[in-house]
Image: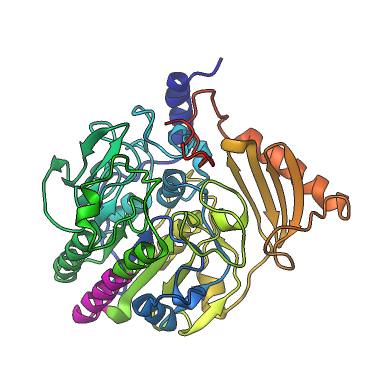
Amino acid sequence: MWSRRNMVKAGAASVVAGMASATGFARSPRRDAPNIVFILADDLGVADLGCFGREDFRTPHLDRLAAGGIALDRAYSNSSVCSPTRLALMTGRYQYRLPGGLDEPLGVHPDLGLPPSVATLPSLLKRAGYATSLVGKWHLGGLPQYGPLKSGYDRFFGIYQGGADYFQHGMTIRGKFIHDLWEDETEIHRQGYLTDLITARSVDEMARLSQAKQPFLLSVHYTAPHWPWEGPEDEAVAKTIRDSFHYDGGSNAVYAAMVKSLDDGVGRILEAIEASGQAGNTIVVFTSDNGGERFSKVWPFRGMKGELLEGGIRVPAIFRWPGHVPAGTRSALTNITMDWVPTLLAAAAAEAPAGLGLEGRDLLPDLATGSAGPDRLLFWRHKAQDQRAAMRGAMKYLAMSGHEFLFDVAADPREVANLRTVRPDVFDALKAEFAAWDKQMLPYLDSTFSYELRGNGHLAGY
């Protein structure tokens, strides 16, 4: 009988055994090794930026980033919620291979997280001679067992948990407030709007890292525009919030202010990159951890965070690397969060240890040539509503709340025409491929938490 405790021991041991640790002596990086600035938004909808279709407010800085690089029009997150996607971003593998990837998201079971023995993007780059720093949100397990410094980052400033009030820097759940702002592994207290604090520290880190004699990975993981619904001028609102899920708050105007603050922050980071004199040798990636939330724009898709409809797993993504990929272009290349690990390792010429078992693919050859790449077979699952999905090319098998579908997401992006009886061969093949893949993953437990926003205003599991 599987239990969470046994799964944490057995599952982690088996995975770690197949994923060589990246600790050890760091080699000198090649002279032209690029710096990497990876910017991750939280719950940003696929069409929440001007360059992806938002029209009621402007995002000039992120639009400028896209104009200098490639806007990826077919980008997917590994999960429809936060920490599972972040686990895939760190490991380059399906998150369901680790016990910490089962809870959707982490937070209910404090014994789960990203084991320090597992090789990660920052630990592999560190081994290749990179300096590494994370500013913002971690959400892959708390101290003392887990944390950024235990998984490859040299420095950390931000929050350990899934979200935080933008002014009080902690979460209120069931009436209990828990403060959550840290410098490395020391709790600190600061005043200010959290998006601005993350931006300011990122700019400082950019200046410090650019003076060093080694390339760097600067991960900037914003909490915006995750709830609670507070713009930069809403400090008075923060004092009235009784529950950080903030069911009774927010508006389109507040959401716009949150996204514009995020965009302004990215603008300041881009300015810092330019000021460093290293913009020509700096990769900048921008994306989101999952699809949009209550006030997001996901058109022309349906669905939202917590759902495997396209609106829950399609995300905006931008890649800029001057001189290596064409500027001002758009790409139809299918990509998913775990692809960033092999892509960035390849850019850095950092070797992946034998047995690492990366499941993402290196996007660089296709990004450089403008190719849409081959059809890919990708999988998702989400315990709430018993959701399952498999996609090859544009054909997508989806199971949800006991119903099964086959959609052509290219011809029918809103997923309304069920082709199950029209293309039974494709339906049966994708369903069988999902079942075979699912057998390779760790199983959900009865205790596994899964995010589900219910119509009565209660989040399942809380």
Farthest residue, direction top: 1
Q: Between residues 57 and 124, which one lies in front from this camera angle?
A: 57
Q: Between residues 288 and 442, which one lies in front from this camera angle?
A: 288
User: Hey, which quadrant is residue 8 in on the image?
Assistant: top left
User: Hey, which quadrant is residue 439 in on the image?
Assistant: top right
Coloration mode: rainbow
Left or right relative to 321: residue 271: left
**Please, what is the dominant secondary structure of the magenta stretch?**
helix
Residue 153 x/y as whole percent: 25, 50
Residue range in magenta is: 263-278
Q: Is residue 189 above or below residue 300?
A: above
Residue 212 x/y as whole percent: 15, 67
Picture residue at 48% right of the left edge, 77% below the top: 55
User: Does residue 353 appear in the picture of this structure?
Assistant: no
Task: Point out the image quarter for the C terminus.
Answer: top left
Picture residue at 50% right of the left edge, 58% below the top: 339
